[in-house]
Image (cartoon, rainbow, N blue to C red):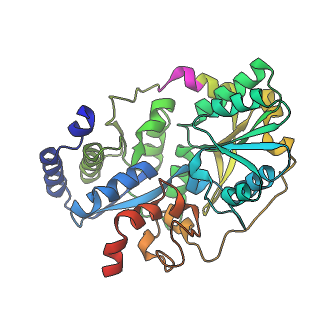
Amino acid sequence: MKYLDEFSNPELARRLIDQIKSAATRRWSIMEVCGGQTHSIIRHGIDQLLPDTVEMIHGPGCPVCVTPLEVIDKALEIASRPGVIFCSFGDMLRVPGSEKDLFRIKSEGGDVRVVYSPLDALTVARDHPDKQVVFFGIGFETTAPANAMTVYQARRLGIENFSLLVSHVLVPPAIAAIMESPSCRVQAFLAAGHVCTVMGTAEYPPLCRRYGIPIVVTGFEPLDILDGIRRTVVQLESGRHELENAYRRAVQDDGNPAARAMLLDVFEVTDRAWRGIGVIPGSGWRLSQAYREFDAEQRFAVTDIHTEESAVCRSGEVLQGLLKPHECEAFGTRCTPRNPLGATMVSSEGACAAYYRYRRLEVTRA
């Protein structure tokens, strides 16, 4: 509890808020990239404590939310096949595909299992040599090393009945895509600290220079976020656009070299589609040629599955920071965590889920 209390101190929070209010003489729009940061902001009411001159825009940093619909449909197709054990983290089971979700596949007899590590799925494959075991590998740079290590171990141990359905996405290309959008109104970013613990900070200074934006790497506790906001406002007010690492207790400039080496071996950069956003060049990973035999898309021949997003769900606008969740007509009525139209409502890091959990009554009264 020591560190939780230390970074949630009300008196220090009030001081930081006062400093932000004093520093902000103009209107500024800051995007927090990470869905975990969004939940912390909404849960603690940080956005409501800020002055009117500072607006927080919620970004596309929820890995479940940005997993494209066609990848969900590929997962559903694979999971429904006989002889397959489909393993996933629990937060993917209720993400809606075109017609079903993984819970429905499970209820219809599919062998869908929740695991707590991709290495658990590898153990399942070793214990069931007569089955094809697939792990649903999604996420940003944070979760990628564990998935890479699992494929590496599968090859090393000769476990041939294991494969990975890959949908990994990368943060820096997403920042570039946001800044190049004609509708962009973001002036600074809070970068996700856990991503930088793996990858380091070297990719961010070029973005600062190219787009003239401050980027502050920060954590997830209230004081982390308030300090990150304060730093971005000070930069904006002074006309600076630099990278600042405000999360040095966890982030080193070179990240985790061993994890990065594993990623470089197992994965290669590719274009990736983001749910509700579209294809961002060079924004994802796929298995490299040396490990391509473990690619579930290839193994189960589902590469030709293509889908269209729902016209009703506006999660794409939420993910791009163009719309606050409660501004969607379906929020809390046609779209709820029990009956979600999109992944942003069902994911534990989704902005819509955060507003539904912490702000729904306020929105209803308004």
- The answer to whether residue 291 is magenta is no
Name the residue rendered at 67%, 44% in the picture.
113
| Image x and y of residue 295, in percent | 79, 38
State the image coordinates of residue 33 (x, y, percent, origin top left): 45, 51
Above or below for 45 versus 5: below
Q: Which residues are magenta?
A: 255-260
Q: Residue 51 sits in which quadrant?
A: bottom left
Q: Is residue 199 left or right of residue 269?
A: left
What secondary structure do most residues of the magenta stretch adopt?
helix
Q: Identify which residue is drawn at 29% across, 42% down.
A: 224
Looking at the image, can residue 85 be seen? yes
Residue 30, percent from left and from top? 36, 56
- Name the quadrant containing residue 245: top left
Residue nearer the viewer, 134 or 312: 134
Does residue 220 appear left or right of residue 274 in this picture? left
Please state if 37 lies on the left or on the right of 45 as rendered. right
Q: Nearer the viewer, residue 68 or 160?
A: 160
Can you say whether 105 is above or below 252 in the image?
below
Q: Quadrant of residue 129?
A: top right
On-image quarter of the N terminus: top left
Residue 271, position as x, y percentages in the image:
69, 47
Against 3, is 324 above or below?
below
